[in-house]
Every structure is written in structure tokens, then in C-alpha cells.
Image: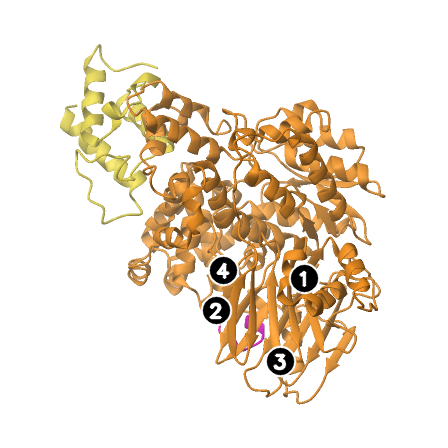
């Protein structure tokens, strides 16, 4: 796992090595093991490396036989051995054992059609010197990031936006519409980001830059061709996909560890990994003092069964607040939960124990309808089919069992769900969540409201839905929305890639093997959500594979403390400072009087609901984000680069 | 305390607790608190705590309905009734 950056100029006026080094330095945390660059008359490429496969031979940029095709690449293509065999049979000669070189030859052999053959999590840029073009691509579900900007006809691209700004060619500025999306969906929706003029390449997408023009396309679309009946061989087929998905993700020249949450999904991935791994598995967990958040009982149960070497990151009072500014710097976005912070600390612990690759269970809840949101959708539909029924709405009391039972009953609880939207709205499933998150906007300044007048994030989302969306069942529509609004742009990004690679740790996601996604998408939804039983088919398969307590355990979402992370009851010093009226006025996003009211309630210990918790995290993170990216205080925090392993240059190169 | 005084106090509480971030918001006595986005089920828990501490009224589970707590006017009427029927409710 690595980071890369580059520049492609409309005119061949050269790309300075110094510019590339600045961009690489901004990504140093992603690739602490080495670096390299190519500086040419039209295109420049920079790379920082986390060595995982072919530690000795995989330095980048890496070329084909005559270096007419050069690649910088972040990620893993798990089926590279099979592709290599196929390419070698077609006459390609390989100099290294790396998956990177397989991509170069795959491009030579199949062009952009190569993408459909890759099973992996990746983003890359291929410079084809024969056509003077740059080919950018990103994996199907958006595990690995790729940002770009077109400035005066030049293309600037990088694994993180901060490297774009480090180039000096892209001016950092907030995008109010992107911000408004964060405060609706939890994250900006690709291609939009929270930075003006900076785009995120969409998951399953590619782009080709040639002659100063960028042309985009897609090679993968999510689809849900749901069958009426579960196939007779569903369980063995599922077992085979899980087994090979994990085995492929254990391909590495360094030891692979596992994150263990104590839930079903990571217990499955760790169990399969422990069986397959040539090393004694090392597992890693976060624990919390608050028993409502803590899952250590189940984590230890699984770790004992696997006989793994288990390491615990205990989250203590003050821990989240102390790293939160760094979390925001790496996430590059305002956040509405602090949940990425413990993941940041977990990655640090993992790296301290010499593990730089971990398997995690993300993706399963989206594939197998694990979240309460799916039950909520089914229940809302059930109730709205018979609006007069007084009994049906009582079932809402069974939702979200981890919340305060006193708040989970009565008219107000039920009506929140039942009044959230009509069944003919394509966003029906997500309207309660979107409407709850949007309460953050109550804190906007009048100026921000005026800037946003006319922007409608929900309408934009509706307009972006594929034509086949309407033909899917309501629960598959919900699953799709969950994938595109939350999994890709938030869970895999702010809480995933950015937190683990802040410490040079690569996370791998067996549940996000596209073959498994396609298998799950074909299953009838009743195989996944059966009454109030989520992930039914996965539980059936897991019987005997993981401890019975975990196999039967209801889903517990991963959460972290929000307001209590910053107030005890006085705010931590930097929160007091950034929420001060003068600072708020500088950024202009949130109304100082409204924020003062929130501070007062946080200090009094009475701000306990979702609305105020998410508002506080949103405001603190947005102000930190603003300060770190748009003020003089700390615009770039470059890491130090070592001597490059690869330093290619040809033709005209511009001065630094 | 009459119904109008209860309503005035409750209004002040709702503005201060749930609407401090929306200073321009006009809340009528008969506006639906849930539908207008003023209060949610967590907020109702807080409101129930207020009714207990301010008016000594204990809201039973079965009383947590929109009929009793849906608007400021509903709340005032409900509190008045609870206080009037055998004196202040006890928990």
C-alpha cells in the first residue's frame, strides 16, 4: 500500500522534480518504506511506498520492457499471480515479482479493458508515453482513493488532496456544496469533495487525460439481480467465496494481522485467516470504558478460540480529543462522528507491533443487510401498508436495542420513522437518517445558507441514481444507497484508508471481493434479512466456524464517544479556542450564538441526544479542517523523503 | 399555576433547549413539535424530565403520545390535567 501523485501538462513545459517531491512528502505517512519519481517534459509521477509484495523489486514508478509505459500505483491486485501467468503466456517478460508490473503488462495487453480482470483494491495512474496519455483508475468499491484537479489545462492527481495543494498548482478552498453533503450524508459524494475544484474519481471509474482533456467512464456498476429463491448450494458457494476471498488477501510478503471487533464479520475473517495464515495471527481490538460501546468480552472469546496474539487499544478519557486534530488532517473532511479516532489509534498500535497489513470485516453489513437501517426500512414499509394498525408500529421498539430504552418507545419514536417520507421516494430508506443528520444545518450562518440557496443534496442524489434502481426491491435500493453514500465515501475513506494509512497500515476487505458482492446481490433479500434477524445466510454459514455466542449475537454498531470526548464538563482547550466567536467568524460556517448555546449545554452535561452530539463533532471537526487547510497556520505538513529508490527523468524538466 | 403560565414556561424551556440554534424560528402554540423538527424522541425524554422538575408531573409511559405532548398547547393542557386530577403527580 502506498501513495502516489502526479502532474500531466497540456504543454510539454516540464514537471519539476521539486514539485513532485513536495507532493510525495505530503503523502509520506502512506508509504514510509521508500519513494521514487519520474520527471518528464509533459508528465511527472511521484510515489511513496509501503513494501508488501516483492519488497526488494517493487519500487515505483515502474515501467514495461522499454519504459514506454510507466505506472504509479496504490493498492493490491490479489489475482496478480493468475494474471501474470496469462500475460507471460502471451509473451510479456517480467523483471520483478510485483503485482505492480502485472498491471503495466495488463495495460499493454488489454488497454482499459484490463480493469474488469482485476480483483483487488487499487488506484493507479499509468503514463503511456507512446500516446502521451495518462490513465487513472480506481477499484470497484472505492477502497483506495484518487483525487484530481484540472488547472489551466493541466491535470494534477494524488492519493490525498493535501498532495494536490502541496504541488502549489491547486489552491485550497472550501466547497460549500461538498460541506452541505457531509452534513446530509456524513461525507461528500464522489466526484464532489469538500474542496473546490478537487474531484474524487468515482469507485468503479476511470479517466483518460490526453491533449489537455479528461474523459471519464465507468467499468463497474453495482447491480442487484435478485433471485426469487435461494440457490440450493448457497452455503457452500458462500463458504468458497469467503475462503478464497480471505486466502487471496493473505497474499503478502509480510505478515498479515486482523482487526477483531467482536462482531460476526471480523470474527469470520480472522477465523479464516488464522486457518490459512502461515504465521501465528496477530489480532487487534479497541475497547472502551463505557460498557455501552465496549465489546471486549466477544473480542477475547474469539481471540482465545483462534489462539491469536491479541493486542488491545484501550480508549481512555482524553484519547479521542488528543488525536482528533490529526484525525481530521488525515480524513481531509469534517466528520459527524468521532468513530474514526479510535481506528486511528488502532492503526498506530498495529504498526507498533510490526504489522502493516490487516484484514477487516467492513462490507458485510452492506452485502448481507446487517444494519438496523435495513430493518427500519422493512418495518416502515410494513407499517405504511396498513397505516391504521396500532400494533405494527409497536415493533419500532425493537429497533436500535443499544439505545436508551426510554427513548425508543412512544409516538415520537414511531412517528420519526413513519413521517420521514413516502414509499414512492427513491431515497425512502435513508430519509430518517438524512433528515437527522441535516439538523446540523440548524447551526449554519446566514451567509452559508445564502451561499447554498438552491443546492439540494437529496435532489442531486435522486438525479444520480441509475435507471435500473427503480426495478430493485426496496431493501436492495437501501443497500445501494448505503454503499454509495456511506460505505465508499465515509467508512472506507475517513474511517478506513485515511486512518490506517496515517500509520502505514493497509487494511484489506474480504467482504468487498466483487465476486462475493455479486453473489450476495443475487440472493433473495429474505436470505439476508429474515424478520428481525440480520445477515441470516451468513449466520447459517458461520455456525461452527465462530463461537456460538458470536454467531448468534445481534449486530452491535461500532460507536465512539462524541460530546463526552471533548467535555468533562469543561471543554478541552483547543475546543474552547476554536469554538470562540472570533474563530467561528473567520471561517463563517457556523453561527457563533448557536454554537455558544451548544457549548453551554455540553458544559452543563445535558446535551445527550444525537442532534447535539453530531452537531458538536461536525462543528469542531469543520473548524479544525478549516484551520488546517485554509489558514496560514498549517497548510502543509510534509514528511521527510529519503533518497529516492527510483529517480527517472527525461527531456525538458522544469526548475523546482 | 394556570394553563397559560404553564404554557409560557414550557415555551421558554423549548426555545432555550431545542431552538437555541434557530433564533428566527417562530413556534405557535399549536405547531406540531415533531413535524416541525423541534423535538425528537431523545428530546421528549428531556422534556419529560423538565415537566417533572418544573411542574412535579410524572409522565407515564402510556402518556407519551402526540395527543399529550404534540404541541405546546397540548403539553400545557396535559400538565394542567395531571396537576388538577388529585394534585401533582408523584413518581
Q: Colour of chain B?
A: yellow
The chain under label 2 reads A
**Earlier along the polypeptide chain: callout 4 or callout 3?**
3
**Membership of A109 in magenta stretch:** no
As displayed, is residue B72 above or below residue A596? above
Residue A38, image x and y in percent? 70, 78
Left or right position of A309 against B22:
right
Q: Label 3: state its secondary structure.
A: loop
Residue A458, image x and y in percent? 36, 50
Disc 2 from disc 4: Cα separation: 10 Å
Tell me the residue that label 3 is attached to: A132
Q: Main secondary structure of the magenta part?
A: loop
Q: Nearer the viewer, mark 2 or mark 1?
A: 1
Disc 2 from disc 3: Cα separation: 37 Å
Q: Nearer the viewer, residue A283 or A205?
A: A205
Q: Nearer the viewer, mark 2 or mark 4?
A: 4
Disc 3 from disc 1: Cα separation: 22 Å
Tell me the residue that label 4 is attached to: A625
Disc 1 from disc 4: Cα separation: 25 Å
Residue A304, image x and y in percent? 77, 29
Tell me the residue that label 2 is attached to: A631
**Membership of A169 in magenta stretch:** yes
Residue numbers of the magenta segment: A164-172
| Disc marking residue A74 | 1
Amino acid at each position: 500500500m502506498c501513495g502516489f501523485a502526479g502532474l500531466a501538462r497540456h504543454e510539454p513545459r516540464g514537471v519539476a522534480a521539486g514539485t513532485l517531491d513536495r507532493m510525495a512528502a505530503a503523502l509520506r505517512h502512506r508509504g514510509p518504506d521508500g519513494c521514487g519519481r519520474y520527471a518528464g517534459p509533459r508528465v511527472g509521477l511521484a510515489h511513496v511506498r509501503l513494501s508488501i509484495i516483492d519488497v526488494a523489486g517493487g519500487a515505483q514508478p515502474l515501467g514495461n520492457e522499454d519504459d514506454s509505459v510507466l505506472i504509479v500505483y496504490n493498492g493490491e491486485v490479489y489475482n496478480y499471480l493468475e494474471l501474470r501467468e496469462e500475460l507471460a503466456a502471451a509473451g510479456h517478460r517480467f523483471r520483478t515479482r510485483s503485482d505492480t508490473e502485472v498491471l503495466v503488462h495488463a495495460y499493454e495487453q488489454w488497454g482499459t479493458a484490463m480493469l474488469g480482470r482485476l480483483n483487488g483494491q487499487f488506484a493507479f495512474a499509468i503514463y503511456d508515453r507512446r500516446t502521451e496519455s495518462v490513465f487513472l483508475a480506481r477499484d470497484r468499491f472505492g477502497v483506495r482513493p484518487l483525487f484530481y484537479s484540472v488547472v489551466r489545462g493541466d491535470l494534477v492527481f494524488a492519493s490525498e488532496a493535501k498532495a494536490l495543494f502541496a504541488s502549489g498548482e491547486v489552491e485550497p478552498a472550501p466547497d460549500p456544496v461538498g460541506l452541505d453533503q457531509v452534513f446530509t450524508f456524513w461525507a461528500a459524494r464522489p466526484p464532489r469533495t469538500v474542496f473546490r475544484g478537487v474531484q474524487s474519481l468515482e469507485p468503479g471509474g476511470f479517466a483518460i487525460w490526453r491533449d489537455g482533456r479528461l474523459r471519464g467512464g465507468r467499468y463497474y456498476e453495482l447491480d442487484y439481480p435478485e433471485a426469487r429463491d435461494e440457490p440450493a448450494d448457497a452455503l457452500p458457494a458462500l463458504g468458497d467465496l469467503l475462503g478464497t476471498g480471505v486466502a487471496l488477501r493473505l497474499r503478502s510478503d509480510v505478515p498479515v494481522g486482523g482487526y477483531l471487533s467482536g462482531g460476526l464479520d471480523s470474527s469470520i475473517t480472522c477465523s479464516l485467516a488464522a486457518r490459512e495464515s502461515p504465521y501465528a495471527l496477530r489480532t487487534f481490538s479497541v475497547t472502551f470504558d463505557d460498557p455501552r460501546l465496549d465489546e471486549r468480552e466477544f473480542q477475547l472469546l474469539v481471540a482465545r478460540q483462534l489462539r491469536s496474539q491479541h493486542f488491545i487499544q484501550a480508549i481512555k478519557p482524553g484519547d479521542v480529543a488528543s488525536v482528533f486534530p490529526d484525525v481530521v488532517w488525515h480524513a481531509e473532511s469534517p466528520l459527524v462522528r468521532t468513530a474514526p479516532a479510535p481506528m486511528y489509534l488502532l492503526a498506530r498500535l498495529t504498526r507498533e507491533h510490526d504489522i502493516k497489513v490487516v484484514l477487516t470485516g467492513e462490507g458485510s453489513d452492506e452485502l448481507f443487510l446487517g444494519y438496523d437501517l435495513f430493518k427500519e426500512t422493512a418495518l416502515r414499509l410494513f407499517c405504511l401498508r396498513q397505516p391504521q394498525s396500532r400494533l405494527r408500529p409497536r415493533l419500532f421498539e425493537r429497533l436500535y436495542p443499544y439505545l436508551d430504552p426510554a427513548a425508543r418507545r412512544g409516538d415520537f419514536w414511531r412517528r420519526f420513522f413513519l413521517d420521514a417520507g413516502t414509499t414512492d421516494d427513491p431515497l425512502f430508506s435513508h430519509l430518517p437518517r438524512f433528515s437527522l443528520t441535516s439538523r446540523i444545518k440548524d447551526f449554519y450562518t446566514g451567509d452559508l445558507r445564502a451561499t447554498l440557496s438552491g443546492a439540494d443534496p437529496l435532489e442531486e442524489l435522486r438525479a444520480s441514481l441509475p435507471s435500473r434502481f427503480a426495478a430493485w426491491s426496496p431493501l436492495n435500493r437501501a443497500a445501494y444507497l448505503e454503499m454509495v453514500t456511506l460505505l465508499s465515501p465515509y467508512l472506507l475513506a475517513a474511517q478506513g484508508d485515511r486512518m490506517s494509512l496515517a500509520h502505514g497500515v493497509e487494511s484489506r476487505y474480504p467482504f468487498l471481493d466483487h465476486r462475493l458482492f455479486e453473489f450476495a446481490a443475487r440472493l433473495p433479500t429474505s436470505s439476508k434479512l429474515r424478520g428481525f434477524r440480520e445477515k441470516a445466510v451468513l449466520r447459517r454459514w458461520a455456525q461452527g466456524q465462530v463461537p456460538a455466542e458470536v454467531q448468534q449475537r445481534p449486530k452491535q454498531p461500532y460507536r465512539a464517544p462524541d460530546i463526552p470526548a471533548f467535555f468533562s464538563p469543561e471543554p478541552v482547550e483547543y475546543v474552547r479556542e476554536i469554538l470562540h466567536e472570533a474563530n467561528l467568524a473567520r471561517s463563517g460556517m457556523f453561527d457563533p450564538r448557536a454554537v455558544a448555546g451548544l457549548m453551554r449545554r455540553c458544559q452543563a452535561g445535558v446535551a445527550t441526544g444525537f442532534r447535539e452530539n453530531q452537531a458538536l463533532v461536525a462543528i469542531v471537526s469543520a473548524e479544525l479542517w478549516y484551520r488546517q487547510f485554509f489558514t496560514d497556520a498549517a497548510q502543509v505538513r510534509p514528511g521527510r523523503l529519503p533518497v529516492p529508490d527510483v529517480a527517472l527523468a527525461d527531456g525538458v524538466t522544469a526548475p523546482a | 399555576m394556570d394553563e397559560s403560565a404553564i404554557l409560557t414556561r414550557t415555551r421558554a424551556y423549548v426555545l432555550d433547549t431545542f431552538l437555541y440554534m434557530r433564533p428566527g424560528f417562530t413556534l405557535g402554540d399549536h405547531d406540531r413539535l415533531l413535524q416541525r423538527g423541534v423535538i425528537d424522541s431523545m428530546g421528549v425524554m428531556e422534556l419529560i424530565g423538565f415537566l417533572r422538575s418544573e411542574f412535579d408531573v410524572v409522565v407515564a409511559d402510556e402518556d407519551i403520545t402526540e395527543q399529550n405532548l404534540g404541541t405546546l398547547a397540548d403539553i400545557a393542557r396535559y400538565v394542567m390535567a395531571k396537576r388538577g386530577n388529585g394534585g401533582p403527580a408523584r413518581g
